[in-house]
Image (cartoon, helix red, strand yellow):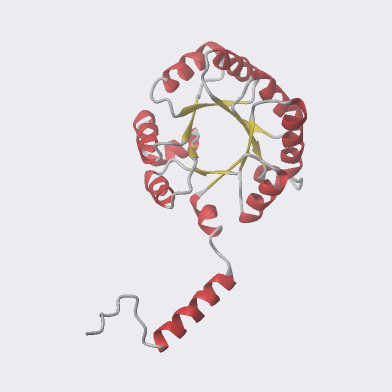
Amino acid sequence: MKLFVDTGDLEEVRQAAEWGILDGVTTNPTLIAKTGKGFRETVLKICELVPNGDISAEVVATDYDTMLKEALEISSWNPQIVVKVPLIEPGIRLVSTLADKGIRTNVTLVFSLSQALMAAKAGATYISNFVGRVDDMSDDGMDAVVDTVRMVQEYGFESEVLVASVRHPLHVVQAIQAGAHVSTMPLKIMQMLFKHPLTDSGLKRFLDDWNAAGLSIFEKASV
């Protein structure tokens, strides 16, 4: 499964990229606005930090003609860019147009299987199923992910299922179990994937024993 970090913070992108396991970055208008920096300069810098990754950058208009202008502008900045489009009627029309032009898209704010079907039929590269926001409403956001993965497989759609609105590591585990293609998450959640108490206690035991023995990796050669 691909791992994307969901942020507009360049330092967070840099840190995640240093681990060598990052496949891409997702942004949205809220995340970009928090940076206090320009949209284009932020997106292009993210492309530099993750040179082989897919970088999702979102249009902000809601009418087709303006969305198309924004999408063509955004996609022209760098071939890594995936145009992010909301799941609305003009958005699906836009995805279909962009697919015909060979421009990759990420359809966002998908909460149901019927919405995912619209995105897949329009030719979306990624279908972003939101799970945390559904969980907040006392429902199970992963249900739509499971159904969307099954739909993509059964009908041979080329879209990849991207699990978004990830709130904790269990969402990532459930995404793997569902067969999702991608999970995108805040940096703090990605950091939590490293953690397990037995790893911490095991490493402490190893190092305590090593230090007690007075050993060193770089021992001087005997004469």
Whether 143 is drawn above or below 40: the answer is: below
Snapshot quadrant of residue 222: bottom left
Residue 22 pos. (x, y %) = 48, 45
Snapshot quadrant of residue 73: top left
In the picture, which quadrant includes the C terminus?
A: bottom left
In the picture, which quadrant includes the N terminus?
A: top right
Whether 197 is drawn above or below 34: the answer is: below
Horizontal arrangement in the rendering, residue 218 relative to residue 60 (left or right): left
Residue 20 pos. (x, y %) = 44, 49
Whether 101 is drawn above or below 114: the answer is: above
Horizontal arrangement in the rendering, residue 60 relative to residue 78 (left or right): right
Whether 129 is drawn above or below 214: the answer is: above
The residue positioned farthest toward the left in the image shown: 223
Horizontal arrangement in the rendering, residue 218 relative to residue 56 (left or right): left
Residue 91 pos. (x, y %) = 60, 20
Q: Which of 222 and 56 lies nearest the eye of the viewer?
A: 222
Q: Which of 118 and 153 lies nearest the eye of the viewer?
A: 153
